[in-house]
Image (cartoon, rainbow, N blue to C red):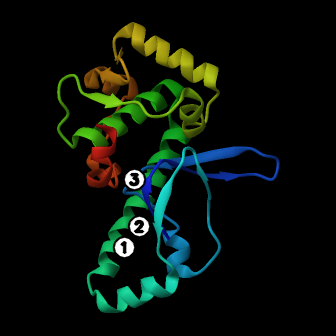
Amino acid sequence: MIAVTVGRIRLSISTPQGRELVLCHLFPGDILGELALIDGRPRSADAFAVERSTGIVIDRAGFLDVAREKADLPLALARHLSGLLRNTNFQMETIALYDLRQRVARFFLFSLHQTHGEELPERPTIRYGLSQTELSAVLGASRPKVNRVLQDMIAEGALTREGTRLCCDAEALRSIAETDISLSFVPRIEQNRKLHR
């Protein structure tokens, strides 16, 4: 297992024909490889360093030694894995059941809750760390289509660029998404909140 300390890692799965589904991007404070650490089976996704990255490596034998000594570790790990499952359910629901405009709105609402917590300010801001190509891969759409949706949302005032940050009209995004994003669907919020500020 690797705990990311610097950089950004893209997790994805791909077909032999080269089609790729991006699962998520990991930032400092996130971990990867925890499933293989627990069950000893091959990795379930590919990991690529998007930028120069470092991390702390924990091997399976060392992890099991610590787990024997720390009685609260299994419950903490179960909570973490529950968060991963919720995140996967959210992503599957978003891609399968919502049109692209709604997917973009849901993505930004999700990011806003990661940054600000359950109660959003009237005009919350986020640092938009993904390129349009990366965002397109996460949302399962082409870059031109995502760009068109972003431009429409900016023209409507749902999003406003402020340098490297985006100012968001949360109510407008909720209206576009036709739903609100509950914190129950925002795993790892305490870890990631600091990364988007």
Q: Measuring 32% from the left and 31% from the top, which residue is drawn there?
A: 126
| Residue 169, x across and y down, in percent | 28, 20
SS state under label 3: loop
- Packing grade of label 3 (10 A; few <14, some 14-19, many >=20) is some
Assess disc 1: are there few (<14), some (14-19) or many (≥20) residues with their C-alpha within 10 Å of its C-alpha. Answer: few
Q: Is disc 2 in contact with disc 3, using a CB cutoff of under 8 Å? A: no
Instruction: Please tell me which of labels 1 and 3 falls first in the chain.
Output: 3
Type of amino acid under label 1: Leu
Q: Which mark is residue 77?
A: 1
Percent across and percent down for residue 136 are 58, 32
**Which mark is on residue 28?**
3
The label shown at residue 81 is 2
Image quadrant where residue 188 sits: bottom left
The residue located at (34%, 50%) in the rendering is 185
> Circles 2 and 1: CB distance less than 8 Å?
yes
Q: Amino acid at mark 3?
A: Pro
Closer mark to the observer between disc 2 and disc 3: 3
Tag 1 and tag 3, C-beta contact below 8 Å: no
Image quadrant where one finds the C terminus:
top left
Side of 22 relative to 156 (left or right): right
> Residue at image x 41%, y 7%?
155
Give the mark nearer the N terminus: 2 vs 3.
3
